[in-house]
Image (cartoon, rainbow, N blue to C red):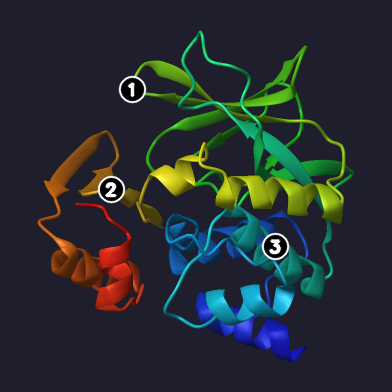
């Protein structure tokens, strides 16, 4: 086992090598989502997001920080490849906050296609919402989320594939993607805009989340929410010190008082 894979599996709390099959893919995906939080705080702090593999590895395996999609799925892809999976990155457009009259969103998300059992499987360890198990990239494919939602893929005439979330009687588009492999230059460009543009929601908002056994816990600006199935409890965060403690206690994110102040969430 390589030094990276040893450290990665230890961070995920896995004592055995996952098998190179669908069960192993889902095992690794679930373990990473439970272990490493979605953390877009560096973008909010104006630091940008460095995708150098050594930087991503040091940050995400530190046990004191998480990352956002470009970091989380890079780490996940490296773990999969170290185990022997064949992986291709793909860029995606996020739709779940779009209104009918909004412009087409840019490609600000990255997902993975994993070759398995004669098909390509969508696997995503970097979305800020609930957990989606690996699912075949096939029209009508479905996967049950950890919170009771049903996720469905459908072909889209204009945008390739659309991932839908069916929950509590509603259907919402999550993101779309094509199966073109994202090249390093494309990923760098998308990451740069996402992490630095004044139009990016990661610059405009404080965003942290983490999958739980039956839902999701999240910070959005000065609000902390805990979703369990179809029930969501919300709490207002009262100030920077409360934010600093919450980040540490609920997400394992350790930040200085100065950095928490600089998030300007209050």
Please report contact status of discs 1 and 3: CB closer than 8 Å, yes or no: no
Residue 102 lies left or right of residue 189; in this view the side is left
Q: Between marks 1 and 3, how big is the CA–CA gap? A: 32 Å
Element under label 1? loop
Give the labeled residue for mark 3. Answer: 74
Alpha carbon separation for disc pair 1 and 2: 25 Å
Q: Please name the residue that numbered disc 2 is placed on.
A: 221
User: Depth-wise, is mark 1 or mark 2 nearer the camera?
Assistant: 2
Q: Residues within 10 Å of mark 1 (few under 14, many from 20)?
A: few
Residue 217 in the image: state x and y as whole percent.
Answer: 30, 52
- Residue lying at the far left in this picture: please name it: 238
Identify the element where label 3 is drawn: helix
Q: Quadrant of residue 146?
A: top left
- Cα gap from disc 2 to disc 3, whole angstroms: 26 Å
What residue is at 25 percent from the left and 76 percent from the top?
A: 257
Q: Tell me the residue at 30%/79% (across/down).
A: 256
Callout 2 crowding tier (Cα within 10 Å): few <14, some 14–19, many ≥20: some
Instruction: Find residue 48 and report its image quarter.
Output: bottom right
Looking at the rendered image, the quarter that the N terminus falls into is bottom right
Q: Which mark is residue 168?
A: 1
| Left or right: residue 214 compared with residue 186 | left
- Discs 2/3, front: 2
Q: Residues within 10 Å of mark 3 (few under 14, many from 20)?
A: many
Q: Of the residues tagged 1 and 3, which is closer to the observer?
A: 3
Q: Residue at x 57, y 51 (%)?
A: 196
Going by the image, does 49 lie left or right of 148?
right
Q: Residue 233 in the image: state x and y as whole percent.
A: 16, 43
First-in-chain label (2 vs 3) = 3
- x, y (%) of residue 265? 25, 52
């Amino acid at each position: 086992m390589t030094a990276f894979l040893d450290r990665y599996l230890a961070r995920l709390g896995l004592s055995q090598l996952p098998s190179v099959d669908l069960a192993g893919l889902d095992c690794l995906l679930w373990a990473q989502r439970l272990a490493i939080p979605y953390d877009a705080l560096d973008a909010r702090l104006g630091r940008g997001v460095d995708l150098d593999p050594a930087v991503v590895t040091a940050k995400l395996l530190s046990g004191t920080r998480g990352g956002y999609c470009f970091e989380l799925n890079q780490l996940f892809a490296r773990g999969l490849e170290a185990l022997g999976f064949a992986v291709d990155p793909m860029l995606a457009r996020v739709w779940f906050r779009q209104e009918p009259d909004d412009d087409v969103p840019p490609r600000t998300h990255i997902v993975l296609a994993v070759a398995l059992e004669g098909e390509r499987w969508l696997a995503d360890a970097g979305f800020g919402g609930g957990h989606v198990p690996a699912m075949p990239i096939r029209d009508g494919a479905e996967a049950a989320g950890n919170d009771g939602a049903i996720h469905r893929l459908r072909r889209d005439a204009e945008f390739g594939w659309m991932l839908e979330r069916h929950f509590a009687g509603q259907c919402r588009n999550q993101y779309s993607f094509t199966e073109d492999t994202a090249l390093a230059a494309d990923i760098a460009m998308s990451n740069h805009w996402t992490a630095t543009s004044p139009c990016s929601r990661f610059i405009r908002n404080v965003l942290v989340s983490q999958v739980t056994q039956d839902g999701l816990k999240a910070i959005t600006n000065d609000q902390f929410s805990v979703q369990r199935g179809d029930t969501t409890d919300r709490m207002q965060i009262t100030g920077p010190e409360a934010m600093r403690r919450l980040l540490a206690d609920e997400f394992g994110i350790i930040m200085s008082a100065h950095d928490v102040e600089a998030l300007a969430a209050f």
